């Protein structure tokens, strides 16, 4: 599958997941890139990675500011903002990555089996800098009222 | 008539949202329990009356299908219907669910209407809710 198709599939999946489960309207940046939009300079950026295996294999890295994750946790869990802890926002970003990737792969071809790993939080600036220094071919940049969501797809060679 | 539900998911936010979604759906829920893994779920199932189990598929340790296997091997638990909530909706995976005796599956992302329709499809709809028309969009085996 062409990278252009993969990007379209990931865009559709992010839209479905965030609008269905989080009631979060999004605008997708077709022309912008993460660097020019300042994504990598966001200080409270949280990063989550999920590997997958199947007809195609690779991993997805998703970056979402902590402040936006707190708002998502409030909506998702029905908790007050002051009750949201890091364990909750970590859980939210893991669920988002899991749903986006699973929804994307099963929508592409439901006859092909695939296996998802366990989502993992990547701490520190290193994972952010790694993506910044090696701009990915396939990424989706989505903008909500409260912040940017960057999703990167990296396929195995 | 109202039903007792056990939700099994290693993710606390997901357990909370499943509960919230079931409540928002208008499903007749008498009681709700939750477990963070299969072992905890089996403990609850052996102590309390549960009408239906909703379990995540992809969990560390004992996954959703391994939980179903354990339940099917237990005379007291084998008749309790299990619904798998999953992002992995490939035909191969769905066939695997069916072979293992899973009563149904719900694909993430899900809506309150989808959850309610699936639960009533398996458990039967209470008589005092006759005006409800179920919808199976995207959730049928």
Image (cartoon, coloured by chain):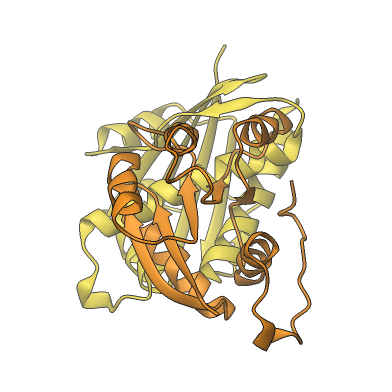
| Residue at left offset 21%, top offset 62% | A85
Q: Is residue B33 above or below residue B42?
A: below
Q: Residue at x 45, y 63 (%)?
A: B5
Residue A101 visible somewhere in the drawing: yes
Left or right relative to A49: residue A108: right
Is A81 located above or below residue B4 in the figure?
A: below
Residue at the far front: name it. Answer: B75
Q: Residue B55: image x %, image y %?
A: 47, 48
Residue B26 falls in which quadrant of the image? bottom right
* Residue at figure coordinates x 39%, y 51% from the top left: B8
Please report the residue visible at 67 percent of the width from the left and 74 percent of the height from the top: B125
Picture coordinates of residue A9, whole percent (x, y): 70, 42
Q: Which chain is yellow?
A: A
The picture places residue A129, in percent across and down from the top left corner, at 33, 34
Which chain is depicted orange?
B
Image quadrant of residue A103? top right
């Amino acid at each position: 599958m062409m990278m252009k198709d993969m990007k379209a599939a990931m865009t559709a999946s992010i839209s479905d997941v965030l609008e269905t489960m989080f009631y979060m309207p999004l605008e997708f940046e077709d022309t912008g890139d993460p660097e020019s939009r300042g994504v990598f300079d966001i200080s409270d950026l949280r990063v989550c990675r999920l590997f997958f295996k199947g007809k195609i294999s690779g991993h997805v890295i998703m970056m979402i500011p902590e402040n936006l994750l707190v708002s998502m946790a409030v909506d998702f869990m029905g908790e007050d903002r002051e009750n949201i802890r890091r364990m909750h926002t970590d859980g939210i970003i893991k669920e988002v990555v899991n749903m986006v990737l699973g929804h994307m792969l099963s929508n592409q071809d439901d006859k092909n089996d695939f296996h998802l790993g366990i989502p993992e939080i990547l701490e520190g600036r290193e994972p952010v800098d790694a993506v910044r220094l090696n701009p990915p071919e396939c990424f989706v940049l989505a903008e909500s009222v409260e912040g940017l969501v960057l999703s990167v797809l990296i396929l195995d060679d | 008539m109202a039903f007792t539900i056990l939700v099994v998911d290693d993710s606390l936010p997901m357990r909370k949202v499943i509960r919230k979604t079931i409540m928002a759906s208008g499903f007749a829920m008498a009681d709700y329990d939750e477990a963070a893994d299969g072992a905890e779920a089996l403990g609850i199932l052996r102590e309390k009356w549960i009408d239906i189990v909703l379990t995540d598929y992809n969990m560390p340790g004992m996954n959703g299908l391994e939980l179903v296997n354990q339940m099917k091997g237990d005379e007291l638990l084998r008749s309790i219907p299990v619904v798998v909530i999953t992002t992995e909706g490939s035909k191969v995976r769905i066939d695997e669910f069916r072979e293992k005796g899973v009563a149904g599956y719900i694909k993430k992302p899900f809506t309150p209407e989808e959850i309610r329709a699936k639960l009533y499809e398996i458990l039967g709809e209470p008589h005092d809710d006759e005006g409800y028309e179920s919808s199976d969009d995207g959730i049928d085996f």
